[in-house]
Amino acid sequence: RARVQPKARVAHRSVPIVPTMMIARCRSESALLETSPSGAFTRRERAAIAFLVSARRRLLVRIGETGVCRVDMQSEKGAEACGRFLEALDDACRGLGLEPAPRDYRENFSTNYRGLFEGESRSYRVDIIDAGTSLQQHPVIWANGEEYELSAHALRRSEVFKEAWGTLLSVLDTWSDHLVKASEPSTRPQLVSVLNELDDAWAHFECAYISELMKVQERARRLVEQAVDCERCLAELEQRHPREVLVGLAAYQVEKRALVACIARLNSVANVQRKGRDDLTIGILDSAVELLEQCEERRSEPGSTAATCLSAAQGIAEQVVEAFEELRNYLQNIQEHLDLLHPQLCQNASLVARLVRWEEAWEIGARYVHNEDVLGSMCYLVGQLRRAGYVAPKLAEMLHTFDAELFLVLPRIVWLCLLADPGRAIELIRRLLPHRFETRAVPVAASAMRLSRSSSNPDLTAPVFELSRVDKVPVARAEVQELVEQFWRVEVALSRAAAPDSPSPRDVLIQRAVAGAGAAPCDAYASLREGPLKEKAIEAAEELMHSVEGWSMELQRHGPEDWNECVNVLVRCVCSGEL
């Protein structure tokens, strides 16, 4: 017992924390080593070897693809156990006084990899040993969706390393068996030889493998480097020429198109949080820039209808341009730090975040800015929503606070806007509910004359046609047409029951839609004159609102993602126009 007592201090050395039972086992094994007749080990060496043998026993094992048992380094617990074993291995080598193999090759490593390895120290890592023991089964590296084959030299080094690793495990298993039987273990020279061979094989494999990874990293960086070069050329042209000259400068447009194409390729390999599209063409960006220029020109006409309509979509165009400029700023900042770029581009959080915003803004721009018909519908709806906010202040509050009730109220308002003027809102609704519309060949009217409808007559186009031309136009199906006609009948009924100072029928319906399907209808219809006409108008309006409620649910549920995106765009445009 007196001989075992000094070994208690060994457990307090700078080694991984291990359970009490493991420490007790190590002390027991150290005592057995001390009594070995070879007498070749010092007490410090015996303690280090005891911990190494115990750490070997703690390694987890899994069945590989070929049915062969391998040390588990993939699971969290397996990698943790392997990490503790490598620390014990390093301690054993230092305890035996072994010099590490030369590692001056690390001077040629990139900044990233030099940070992982400490000078000439062994710096044993789980990922290196995992690669070294598995490259024979998987001799390729996948990066950014591309396959890179390792060189024959790296594979040979991997084979030597794997053999040395297996030899060490076998020797430690032999030591463990001898310790259990209290028999004589291997001699010191034998163990030293095994440890030196492993360290030498490790150093050679580490050099070959990291060199291969650096080549992969260099090839992976080319996408970013190409984008950086395009952005640099674009910035130089912008410094040399004024803005009005750049618009007609062919070289500038070529570089801009090349930069957008490079960003699209980057997005396809690095943007794993969204779709990773590679078709993000420059047309959407050009449309957004053009729309912003039109808004700038119309600022001198603040009261005009055109200026109001364009300002409604200005927020969408600004998002597209801002997302593009954010990517340009990133490329400007990263060009001096390309060596810090992770070879797996999807692991660069700053790059991915900007690509996510660019793809999202591009898709929104493609839906609502690039298509003139949809843009017109969006501008019309934004204008109607702003007006509805004045009619029903509760709606304005919902729009600014993004209240949960807004998601029930907004589809009703959208339907009322469509029913009030189908021609101006049909394109946007058709995108959300395509099955409710069809395309028909319609003769082109020879005259632009329109007949204004009375309170009982629907809006009509003069029946004067030029039969030599036809256009394909979207037309609502019968069920939507019936809803439109029901809306017109309600408008007539509300008009007849209205007092001289009553709100318009549309304003009454807006207030009713904001109040909700379960609310008392008295407040919305309070301005109507008392009498039979009021009762009929309320009955017709309630029937309409009941029908609209069903259509509102369909609008939300048919394409939830498209509808949520539409809501975000509408709210953003409405609120941005009031800032």
Image (cartoon, helix red, strand yellow):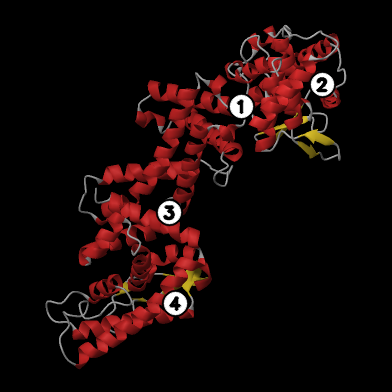
| Camera-nearest label, 1 or 3 | 1
> How far, Cα to Cα, is label 1 from label 4?
73 Å
Q: Return the residue at label 4.
A: 480
Residue 465 x %, y %: 43, 74
Look at mark 2 in the image and give the residue it sits on: 168
User: For this rendering, which residue is in front, 247 or 568?
Assistant: 568
Distance between the alpha carbons at the discs numbered 3 and 2 = 65 Å
**Which circle's residue, 1 or 3, is located before the other in the chain?**
1
How far, Cα to Cα, is label 4 from label 3?
Answer: 23 Å
Q: Is residue 36 left or right of residue 412?
A: right
User: The disc labelled 3 sits on which kind of residue?
Assistant: Tyr
Tag 2 or tag 3, which sits nearer the N-term? 2
Q: Amino acid at mark 1?
A: Ile
Q: Residues within 10 Å of mark 4 (few under 14, many from 20)?
A: some
- Residue appearing at x 83%, y 27% in the figure: 180
Q: Looking at the image, which residue is at 50% across and 40% down? A: 282
- Whether label 1 touches label 3, CB < 8 Å: no
